[in-house]
Structure formats: structure tokens, C-alpha cells
Image (cartoon, rainbow, N blue to C red):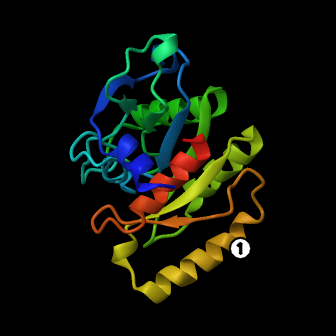
Amino acid sequence: MTEANRQKIFSGNWDFIRSVPSMRFLPPEGPVEIAFAGRSNVGKSSLINALIGKKGLARASNTPGRTQELNFFVPQGYSGAAADLPPFAVVDMPGYGFAQAPKAQIAAWTKLVFDYLRGRSVLKRVYLLIDARHGIMKNDEAVLAMLDKAAVSYQLVITKSDKIKPAALAELLQRLEGDLARHPAAYPHIIATSAATKQGIEILQDAVLVLLGL
């Protein structure tokens, strides 16, 4: 993947286009979508900001469960007409698992996550984020099983890789690669990243561009 292609997509401005609190508010299906999913406070918003090089575009918070809607972002400069669609849209999904909110609210946005993953035909791939410090947890296993059943392509992305020692990270990656052999919808390559140090960000950018044929 050439540096020019990466710069063209990820160094320009991006627009936030919509927050979706329920399926009926989804934008019309148009460009291919890639979605970022993971447990609450896994670092989705921070990783998206690092991916597209724009601080503060996706709202990051230290409070688990802050993102409660599907947030859609596209590269700036597209009209939205069928002849001028953006190359793809990025979707920041609500975190699942623990969140500081009423149970009914947690249940509502958890259902939104699962309904979107199962029913969005333009969804090309889900990047499932796993905190390097914790590995795959019970809630993650449920999502892996659901994605396998729905035959939704997904790829594991390790976040906060700078928070553990290199040897521990290598051990985690080896263990997870073995685990993925049991999951038919999983893409076998795992990307280790850190939004803080930018570790793995260019690798993730290139992976997105290759996936979309850009």
C-alpha cells in the first residue's frame, strides 16, 4: 500500500454525519461501512481518532458506556449522491458490557449493536477491539459467537498495547491466534495497536485500504 493512498484517505478532513439511537434512524445504505466494536472503555473512539488522524472527532471518555449510539463518519467532500459516494464510512459503535447507566438503557444500546451487526448489508467488516490488559472476556466471547453465526467478517484489533510488556503482548497474540481457529468468520491476522503511541496505526490503515480495494 503506497503512502500516497494512505495520505489521500486518512490525512484529509472527515465529517461526522449522524448519531443513530435505534435502527429506524440508520442512514440509507450507500458506501461500504466498517465498524469498530468492543467492550465499554476498550478505546474505540481513541483508536478511530488515531486511524483517521483527527483528535476529538470521535468523542473519547474515561467513563465506560459514554458512546451510546452508532456514530457515522465519512471523508469530507462527498455530496452523498449515488454518483459521489465516499469510499467508505466508519461506524463507532456503543460499547457492550459494563457501563455506568440504568440497566434498561444498557439493554437498549446492546440490542442496537447486535441488530446493526446482524442486519446491515453494506457492512464490510467489524474490527473487534480487545484490551491488551484483559484479553478476550465473557462478553467478547458472546459477540464472537454472534458474528460467526451471522457470518459477519471480523478482525481482532488489540488496543492499549503499550500498557503491557512486549513479551506479554507476543504471548497474547499467539494465544488469540490459536483461539481464532475456532471462529469461522474471523480474519486470521490480529493487529496490535496503541492510540497513545500510534503503534500499529499505519498497519490498520493499510489493512482497511486493502480490504476495500483502495
**Front residue of 11 and 155:** 11
Q: Residue at x 70, y 50 (%)?
A: 145
Labels in figure, total:
1
**Front residue of 139 and 202:** 202
Q: Residue at x 75, y 57 (%)?
A: 183
In the image as oriented, which residue stretches furthest toward the top? 81
Q: Position of residue 126 (x, y in %)?
A: 57, 45
- The amino acid beneath tag 1 is Gly
In the image as oriented, which residue stretches furthest toward the left? 56
Residue 102 is left or right of residue 176, and the answer is left
The crowding category of the residue bearing disc 1, from other C-alpha atoms within 10 Å (few below 14, some 14 to 19, many at least 20), is few
The residue to which callout 1 is attached is 178
Vertical order, 180 against 40 (above or below):
below
Q: Residue at x 37, y 32 (%)?
A: 73
Q: Position of residue 131 (x, y in %)?
A: 44, 65
Q: Position of residue 144 (x, y in %)?
A: 65, 52
Q: Position of residue 167 (x, y in %)?
A: 48, 89
